[in-house]
């Protein structure tokens, strides 16, 4: 078991003929993902690594029975691509694209509220259920199948956390990067809820950063609803105030969204928080031991 | 992207907002002529910062002669405010504007409401330079009204804003015109902030935008070439500007360890871990996911050009970013400019073997690290003049 993607996921790649789209389509196929089709307007009829290319998502869905898509479309057109995937009725859309205008995402978010489509991202590394399905740009080889869910706002910190877990012999049920943009699809709370409901996930690692209030809301959700242990890390503890640190979301303003505030909120709700990024794996291990489930979560010695 | 006050006021005026008469000047002589036309006036230093008044960047002049003298002192002056950093900003432009007799000061802004994926009007009947203290000490004096980014501003939202800000009935029509202009500007030009502080009621009973700040969403500049032209490079950190030319996220800091990282989260975490080992980062640098070897080389050269940098720590966990691209860029830049400081490299992720091979074949003197803690520790030791342990 896992959340959102598994071996039954039939994946489309929007922007499959582009540089990134092509490269990562090959990587996803090599990982074992069931990539059933690609979409690039005007390039219908071509193939990429034997995957058929269609002009529109609707056409691709009709021909392949796809239920999810991953987007590698440039920022100018990415919001439109998300809407197209939602309009075609896909269950899950994963948008990797970085640099989409905020107001475009505001419009997308409103549109999605009236549909059944779940969005991951944008500006994210995607999602992986180890051994079954990789939809995105995550390096597959660091992941091991197992029982710990990973959720992060940062792509590379997702890899860092997964790498530390795998090195400790702790596998992952599903790892998901929700993205660094201020307006995004699924947030911490929604993904935590999915992990709580997934019988195969025994514990969760959550990685946040300065800015926004998603981590504080997640802390409240954990206190009220989570029965599974959660370990966390918040990056940006030493970031100077008022300086924008790349992620549009990662800015401290008006004393809100600070690392200290988020760490305090999480600790108050019973979450073990790693002091530094090298201790994410060890902190989760401590949480597993505290909960008496360390042995069930070990995938190999 | 930020713009100057005078540019913000010109934009607001285009959208129908009431702004005082003013002229932007580059020399004391121009100030003299502008002041002569206006009579008693205010000189405002144009730098990308608020809190200019406290730093000596806003002066009243009763005559044109006085204005010229004040301008002579103000041009070339370095203003240090709580927003400029300790190095401050040099005054190159002065806005000469009407001296307005003020009866009351309000605060009014439109910004992004990320949680609701919309806009947020923020207002206060206690505007002025102390607004940040008001927000901290009397949060009840600050009102917030969410607005849909899809449907735009509605009449009842304007009414609610005006009621809660205690805008007198006589100024309601002017207030609604202003608020509509601000929201329309925000939506049409992809702003991230439209702020009027203070918005004043003059002795004649009119509303006027006495100061204005407008910021833009960098991601949307591609569809607003007319806004991109307003960029003033002189206001930006030289290294940050060079980085932006290559789509690199670079922020100058004050330490001595140059950092080159992929991903904003990992880049911030790298700063955190350097601090853990007692070191100080010289910068935040996220090379992003789609960097080419050329961009990586540019990034590396920016680090090398910083005289404070005593060691460089490259921390890469490749996903969309391939380790061999990073390695190629670093080797190319080091060959071109030479490498005078120790270099610590931690590579992991996509194409890691290829990347390590390129680095080892280059013959460069590289300290390799097995993980980010190891790398940060080594970089801190080397920056402090010690060896790697």
Image: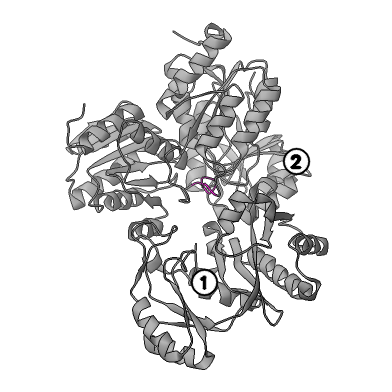
Tell which residue pokes out farthest to the right in this image: B156
Q: Position of residue B387 (x, y in %)?
A: 17, 31
Q: Position of residue A273 (x, y in %)?
A: 51, 25
- Taking the spot 67% from the left edge, 15% from the top edge, the residue there is A199
- In whole angstroms, how far apart are the C-alphas of marks 2 and 1? 47 Å
In this view, B154 is above or below B256: below
Examine the residues drawn in magenta and state their main secondary structure. Answer: loop
Q: Label 2: state its secondary structure.
A: loop
Q: Which of the chains bears the disc numbered 1?
A: B
Q: Quadrant of the C terminus of chain B?
A: top left
What number is the disc on residue A89?
A: 2
Give the class, few, some or many, for how many residues have Cα within 10 Å of label 1's Cα (few <14, many ≥20): many
Q: Is residue A247 above or below residue B245?
A: above
Q: In the rendered image, which quarter is residue B167 located in?
A: bottom right
In screen coordinates, is B280 left or right of B94?
A: left
Residue A25 seen in the figure? no
Q: Which residues are magenta?
A: A247-253
> Is residue B99 or residue B265 the one in the foreground?
B99
Task: Answer whether residue B363 is magenta in the image.
Answer: no
Is B141 left, or right, of A289 in this rendering? right
Viewer-proximal residue, A244 or A140? A244
Q: What percent of the width, then of the height, locates residue B95?
A: 48, 79
Residue identifier under label 1: B5
Find out whether residue A251 is within the magenta segment.
yes
**Residue A254 rendering spot, x and y as whole percentages:** 56, 49
Q: Residues within 10 Å of mark 2 (few under 14, many from 20)?
A: some
């Amino acid at each position: 078991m896992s959340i959102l993607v598994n071996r039954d996921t039939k994946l489309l790649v929007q922007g499959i003929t582009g540089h990134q789209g092509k490269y990562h389509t090959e990587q996803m196929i090599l990982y074992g993902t069931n990539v059933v089709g690609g979409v690039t307007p005007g390039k219908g009829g071509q193939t990429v690594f034997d995957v058929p290319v269609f002009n529109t998502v609707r056409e691709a869905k009709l021909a392949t029975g796809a239920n999810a898509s991953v987007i590698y479309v440039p920022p100018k057109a990415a919001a439109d691509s998300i809407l197209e995937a939602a309009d075609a009725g896909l269950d899950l859309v994963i948008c990797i694209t970085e640099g989409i205008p905020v107001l475009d995402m505001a419009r997308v978010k409103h549109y999605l509220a009236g549909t059944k489509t779940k969005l991951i991202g944008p500006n994210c590394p995607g999602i992986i259920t180890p051994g079954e399905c990789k939809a995105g740009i995550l390096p597959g080889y660091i992941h091991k199948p197992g029982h710990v869910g990973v959720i992060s706002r940062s792509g590379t910190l997702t890899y860092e956390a997964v790498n530390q877990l795998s090195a400790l012999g702790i596998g992952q049920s599903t790892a998901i990067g929700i993205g660094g943009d201020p307006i995004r699809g699924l947030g911490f709370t929604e993904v935590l809820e999915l992990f709580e409901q997934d019988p195969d996930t025994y514990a969760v690692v959550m990685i946040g950063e300065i800015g926004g209030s998603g981590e504080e809301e997640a802390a409240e959700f954990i206190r009220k609803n989570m029965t599974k242990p959660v370990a966390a890390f918040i990056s940006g503890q030493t970031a100077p105030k008022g300086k924008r640190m790349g992620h549009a979301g990662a800015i401290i303003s008006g004393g809100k969204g600070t690392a200290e505030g988020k760490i305090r909120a999480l600790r108050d709700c019973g979450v073990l928080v790693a002091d530094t990024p090298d201790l994410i794996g060890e902190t989760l291990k401590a949480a597993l031991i505290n909960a008496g489930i360390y042995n069930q979560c070990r995938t190999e010695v | 992207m930020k713009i100057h006050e005078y540019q913000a006021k010109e934009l607001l005026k285009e959208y129908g907002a009431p702004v005082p008469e003013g002229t932007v000047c580059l020399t004391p002589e121009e100030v003299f002529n502008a002041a002569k036309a206006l009579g008693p006036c205010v000189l405002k230093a144009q730098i990308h910062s608020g809190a200019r008044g406290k730093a000596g960047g806003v002066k009243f002049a009763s005559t044109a002669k006085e204005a010229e003298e004040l301008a002579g002192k103000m041009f070339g002056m370095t203003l240090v405010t709580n927003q400029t950093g300790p190095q401050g900003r040099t005054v190159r432009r002065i806005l000469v504007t009407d001296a307005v007799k003020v009866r009351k000061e309000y605060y009014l802004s439109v910004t992004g409401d990320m949680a609701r994926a919309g806009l947020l009007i923020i207002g206060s009947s206690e505007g002025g330079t102390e607004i940040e203290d008001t927000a901290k000490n009397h949060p009840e004096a600050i009102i917030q009204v969410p607005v849909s980014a899809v449907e735009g501003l509605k009449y009842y939202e304007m009414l609610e804003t005006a009621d809660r800000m205690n805008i007198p009935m006589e100024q309601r029509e002017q207030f609604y015109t202003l608020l509509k202009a601000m929201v329309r500007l925000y939506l049409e030009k992809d702003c991230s902030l439209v702020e009027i502080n203070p918005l004043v009621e003059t002795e004649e009973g009119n509303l006027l935008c006495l100061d204005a700040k407008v910021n833009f969403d960098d991601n949307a500049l591609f569809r607003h070439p007319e806004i991109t032209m307003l960029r003033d490079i002189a206001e930006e950190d030289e290294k940050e500007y060079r980085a932006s030319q290559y789509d690199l996220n670079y922020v100058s800091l004050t330490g001595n360890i140059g950092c080159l990282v992929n991903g904003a989260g990992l880049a911030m975490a790298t700063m955190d871990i350097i601090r853990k080992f007692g070191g100080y980062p010289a910068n935040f640098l996220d090379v992003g996911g789609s960097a080419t070897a050329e961009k990586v080389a540019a990034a590396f050269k920016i680090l090398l050009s910083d005289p404070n940098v005593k060691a460089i720590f490259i921390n890469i966990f490749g996903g969309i970013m391939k380790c061999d691209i990073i390695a190629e860029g670093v080797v190319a830049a080091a060959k071109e400019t030479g490498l005078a400081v120790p270099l610590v490299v931690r590579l992991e992720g996509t194409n890691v073997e290829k990347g390590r091979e390129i680095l080892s074949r280059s013959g460069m003197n590289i300290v390799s690290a097995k993980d980010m803690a190891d790398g940060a520790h080594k970089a801190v030791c080397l920056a402090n003049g010690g060896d790697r342990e």
